[in-house]
């Protein structure tokens, strides 16, 4: 990492330190992680984090030791200290829990980009796949905030939870097309949406680039909204009570293997978070 700055979130200079690190709740089991994100060992893990600034590098401005921040450091966040460029940090609003702030930069930005790509409007229906997952739960709520009716695919165990967010649940798996059609003719995900007559310009996928190319649909994801202002905007929605980011579980860093085992079950509601140096 560049030596132009070194921000660290840590317990060392803070009177009431609560540094946390989080990682994205991927729906892919660990045995395929190497295929998706190849690693050369020794290799770090974890991307998003929140915590307090411990030290400020020479020549840097904008933050001071003790400031509460969140950020994204590729494969470096599951650690006692995180080094980050100042322009890759956002302020954590007071009142936003540490574990929620740590869950925002990757999944939140991905959801933000995906929803922005299809520009939902009042009176429209949006279908969000895996709507209880880390990305989906934010996307579903952002589409609701834009005024759209939102149908979210989920397992039965998440139906009541999604309803509590104003999202209409529909079970994924065989027969999904018919179930969506019965709820809202004219809505679906990439292949289903095409079959149902949704214009490609109103479809976004964050995992199926081939389908996006095939149909000319959007594939906007984290890269299209990967910025501290977006993280802060999402955090402000959380602080205002307009956005809920459920934290399924919090593990101490020492139990990172257990956290990945839980992730591999592929039924994370929201995010799984690692806590570093709890006091
Ligand atoms: N391109 C990017 O920038 C980017 C960024 C982040 C993530 N991603 C990708 O986007 C995907 C979602 O990420 P995530 O972090 O939201 O995942 P996640 O939190 O692990 O997703 C878990 C959710 O997936 C649902 N699910 C499990 N099996 C399903 C199925 N067969 N059909 C539909 N939903 C199913 C589960 O629903 P129930 O528990 O209700 O069964 C659970 O709520 C992943 O493939 C990830 O790699 C891409």
Image (cartoon, rainbow, N blue to C red):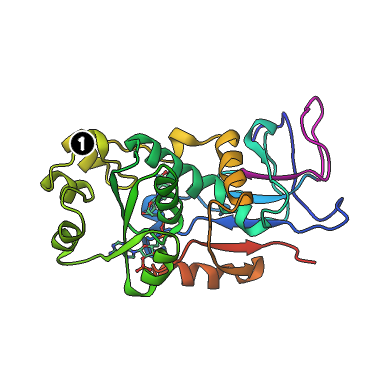
Residue found at the very far front of the displayed protein: 123
Q: Position of residue 95 (x, y in %)?
A: 71, 54
Stretch of the chain drawn in magenta: 54-72
Q: Position of residue 131 (x, y in %)?
A: 37, 58
- SS under mark 1: helix
Q: Inspect the magenta stretch and tell me whether residue 65 lies in it.
A: yes
Name the magenta segment's main secondary structure.
Answer: loop
Whether residue 245 is visible:
yes
**Residue 77 showing in the rendered view:** no
Q: Nearer the viewer, residue 49 or 75?
A: 49
Residue 77 in the figure: left or right of residue 51:
left
Relative to 72, is 18 on the left or the right?
A: right
Up the image or down, 217 lies above or below 20; here it is above
Q: Residue at x 60, y 43 (%)?
A: 73
Identify the residue at horizontal 67%, vertical 57% (top origin): 97
* 128 up-or-down from 209: above or below: below
- Image quadrant where one finds the N terminus: top right
Nearer the observer, 183 or 21: 183
The residue at which mark 1 appears reads as: 200
Q: Which residue lies at the image location 38% right of the left edge and 67% below the top edge?
A: 266
Q: Residue at x 20, y 33 (%)?
A: 216
Within the displayed image, which quadrant is ligand 1 positioned in? bottom left
Asked if 1 appears above or below 51 in the picture, the reply is above
Indicate whether residue 124 is drawn in magenta: no
Dividing the picture into quadrants, the one containing residue 74 is top right
Q: Position of residue 144 (x, y in %)?
A: 41, 49
């Amino acid at each position: 990492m560049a030596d132009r700055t070194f921000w660290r979130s840590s317990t060392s200079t803070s009177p009431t330190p609560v540094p946390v690190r989080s990682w994205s709740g991927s729906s892919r089991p660990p045995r395929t992680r190497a295929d998706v994100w190849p690693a050369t060992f020794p290799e770090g893990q974890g991307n998003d984090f929140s915590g307090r600034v411990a030290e400020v590098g020479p020549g840097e401005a904008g933050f001071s030791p003790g400031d509460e921040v969140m950020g994204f450091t590729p494969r470096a966040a599951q650690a006692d200290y995180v080094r980050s460029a100042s322009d890759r940090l956002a302020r954590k609003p007071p009142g936003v829990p540490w574990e929620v702030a740590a869950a925002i930069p990757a999944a939140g930005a991905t959801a933000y980009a995906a929803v922005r790509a299809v520009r939902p409007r009042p009176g429209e229906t949006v279908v969000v796949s895996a709507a209880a997952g880390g990305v989906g739960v934010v996307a579903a709520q952002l589409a609701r905030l834009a005024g759209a009716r939102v149908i979210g695919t989920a397992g039965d165990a998440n139906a009541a939870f999604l309803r509590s967010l104003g999202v209409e649940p529909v079970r994924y798996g065989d027969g999904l097309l018919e179930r969506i059609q019965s709820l809202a003719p004219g809505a679906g995900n990439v292949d289903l949406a095409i079959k149902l007559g949704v214009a490609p310009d109103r479809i976004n996928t964050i995992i199926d680039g081939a389908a996006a190319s095939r149909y000319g649909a959007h594939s906007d994801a984290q890269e299209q909204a990967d910025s501290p202002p977006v993280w802060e905007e999402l955090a402000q929605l959380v602080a205002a009570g307009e956005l809920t980011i459920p934290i399924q579980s919090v593990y101490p860093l020492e139990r990172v293997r257990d956290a990945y085992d839980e992730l591999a079950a592929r039924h994370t509601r929201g995010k799984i978070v690692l806590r570093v140096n709890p006091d």
